[in-house]
Amino acid sequence: MKPNHRPTGTADAQALLTRAVTLHQAGQLAEAATLYDQVLKRLPKQADALHLSGLIKAQTGAVAEGIERIRQAVKADPRQPIFHANLGRLLEAAERWEDAARAFRDAARLAPLDPSLPRLEAAAWTRLGRHGPVAQALRRAMMLEPADAENAAALGDALYDGGLFLPAAAWYGRAAVLEPRRILAAFNRGAALRDAGRPDGALAAFRALADLAPQMAEPLEQCMEIRHGLGDDAGARAAARRLLTLVPGHMAAVRTLGIAETCPDPLWLARLVRLDPMAEEVVLALAGRLYGLRTVVAERLYRHALALAPASGLALSGLGLARAALGLEGAGRMVLRAVRVAPGDAALAANAGSAFQLALQPDAALSWHRRALVLKPDDAAAWINVGTHRLNANAAEEAIPPLDRARRLADPERDPGQLALANSNLGVAWMALGLHGEAVAAFRAALDRAPDDAAIRSNMLFCLCFDDRADPAEVFREHRAFERHLPPLPAVPLAVEERDPERILRVGYLSPDFQRYPGPGYHFLLPLIEGHDRGRVEVTCYHNDRSRDATTERFQTAADRWRDVAALSDGELDRRIREDRIDILVDAGGHMSRNRMPLVARRPAPLQVSLPLYPNTTGLGAVDYQIADPRLAPPGTDALHVEKLIRLPGCVLCYRPAESGFAPTARPPVERNGHVTFGSFNNITKVNAATIALWARLLAAVPAAKLVLKWRGLGVGGGADRRLLAAFARHGIGAARLELRGITPDPYQDYTTIDVALDPVFANGGTTICDALWMGVPVLNQSGPTKIGRWGATLLAAVGMGELVTPYDEAYLAQGLRLATDRAFLDAQRDGLRERMRRSALMDEPGYARAVEAGYRMAWRRWCAGLPPVAFDVAEGAERG
């Protein structure tokens, strides 16, 4: 080392100093220290000797003495920057940070072009957490070395720690520009922008960093969180998916995908539960998502949540609802425990109402729905529950006001699902009253909010079948559009046991109507399932309803295999059908209530057939065939079917009457009444404006005649009664000419009171035609332009009563007038009608079963040969197999 200036004092002191420096540089510290001390004895204020001996003191462990020596050197010669700098270093070693910082600052004043000195000062201030002085020092360093990325990043740190986020972001950005691979500076820039309240800028910064460092998880975490904050759920999910490719078990990413998940099968939410099974809120979220889709699983999850939090009202309520939906015991007890836990919670009260509704306790249900409204009068969901309760009670007119109120209360942005449900149920109410235009408009409004809701779309399609103002081609297009709104389906290979065209066929029947009521299953499905040749056909019944009755037991006995599937998801039922190795799946529900059209669209069986209890095409490309006959589907109607038509030689359906204590009367009621009595026991959704107008004309033409209308909800003076009476009154028919009746336990009972049954125009009856004929009552029918208007043509013709099938209004009136005034003609129609029906194709159970089996076999042979479906006729008396 060389002294910084010439020493004062004697020549020998200078010589000693020179020798000491030489020894010091050679690492001979003890010898050098001795000579420095000798110099200081001669010249006590010799600055170089003080400075250099102070360094040796520090190097040999005497830091405090070294600091004191260098302080003396600074005092002896304060203009030397190295004295101040080395003093700072010794003060750093002694962890005297503030003194060190000041020493470095003094050094920097004396050597303003040395960038290392402000950096050293900044480091000392950083130790003290003095962000302002740190930033000042680093700004001086950046003036000296503007391209120093490390100083720029450090300055960003100081400003960020001091709460100056935007300036910090600027310096981090400068550091990242100076050194593009300086990952931490780029990340910190995003964090600074985020904390400065600039989420868009922060997001851009983190996205750029994620591209720059694709294996780095932290920027993706930030992207996910910021997008959450911005309400961009789709962007958050995209970031979460990318993050999971790096960190497969990343909890926050799985939570993002799980909580925001909207797909029918919430895989990510299920994965989140597996990762954190003790998180009660996550378990409850998954249970809520699966309720109604996989209710059996939801019930287990609610039990698990209850084990985690025994006093959770939500877990108790959800468990009660799930058990009620599954028909299990204890549902009522659970929902009542829930409302005791939180008596002021409107949602829990509403859930109690829904559970009692599912448990077929309507009075208790209504009480709890009203309680929910007391607690939260403006809750759209509670009003929907009340309206739905009235619908289930067949009081459609009474359902409209609460559903309309729910529609007005539902927030279209926050509660699109509630708004969709309110409109959908309102559509069901309008449809029940025969107001199809209003119903279709309500269903379309619901689909505007929930375009992929299959149940709502099915409701609309069913309603369109009854709308006489709808263009049949447009109705067909709407049916075709159904599958476009279904989620994408994975291609799953079919497990076919063997492509043997003559082996026993495994036929599966899918229906919610394996019971006496409310559907037509008893009359039209039971004869077929019991009548199959078990040497040629093996039958599996898939019962898609949780209700059972004595008729259900008959179906189950008749089937080779029985599956209760109402609680299964589409995916689970798909797997079940495939495991059963079904060759031909026959859907008997179409788009009617409790249907499984999304399941059918998955094509779980090689061949799929529609048995048309539903009066139209299914619209599904996955349905290969539909059963028909030449009258129900005359030439030219194939174009309005997606399916290829299998036309049976007799009748599309075979009717089995139910057991009853009532029989046809020996003489027509006109003899004892003195006037002819017309009657219609059809669903009043079929009694549209055109039908009412035509019937009013008939009543006007037969002034003494009366008309009996019988359906659910009629005859009690309610809104449906008033609506019907007002509609006839507009055509000049007073209330005295009409008799409105409700449903009776025995559906055949009131046929003993009417002379002639009037079939609605456009939408014919089905079961009601058969019931009337079985009770010896002729049915006056008008054939229409669509399938729903041709039921009468096929059913009546099958019994040999084709002359009562009329082509237009005037012919309908003429034939009705003849039945009312020509007693011989009326007697001829009624005479021996039950026996004629019994001998007809409409009740030929063995012939019907053989014809259907022949149709299945012909379709199966084509499939085994690799041929596409094609329309064909089953020949009269087709051979088995």
Image (cartoon, grey):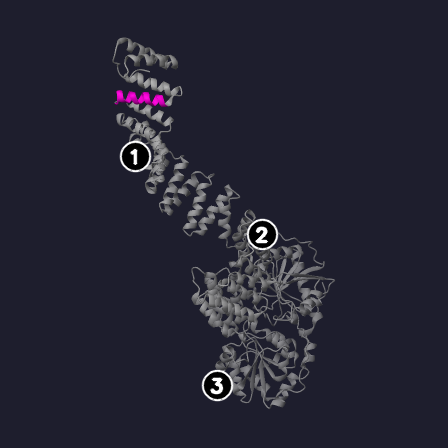
Disc 3 marks which residue?
A: 732
Q: Quadrant of the C terminus?
A: bottom right
**Viewer-nearest of labels 2 and 3?**
3
Q: Is residue 86 on the magenta stretch?
A: no
Q: In the rendered structure, which disc, 2 or 1, sits on the residue that comes first in sequence?
A: 1
Mark 3: amino acid: Gly
Circle number at residue 136: 1
Q: Can residue 871 be seen from the camera position used here? A: no
Quarter-of-image position of residue 872:
bottom right
Measured as percent of width and height from the top left, residue 232 is found at: 43, 51
Q: Secondary structure at mark 2?
A: loop
- Position of residue 279 relative to residue 810, above or below, is above
Mark 2: amino acid: Ala
Q: In the rendered structure, which disc, 2 or 3, sits on the residue that comes first in sequence?
A: 2
- Position of residue 168 relative to residue 832, above or below, is above
Badge 2, how many Cα within 10 Å: few under 14, some, many 20+?
few
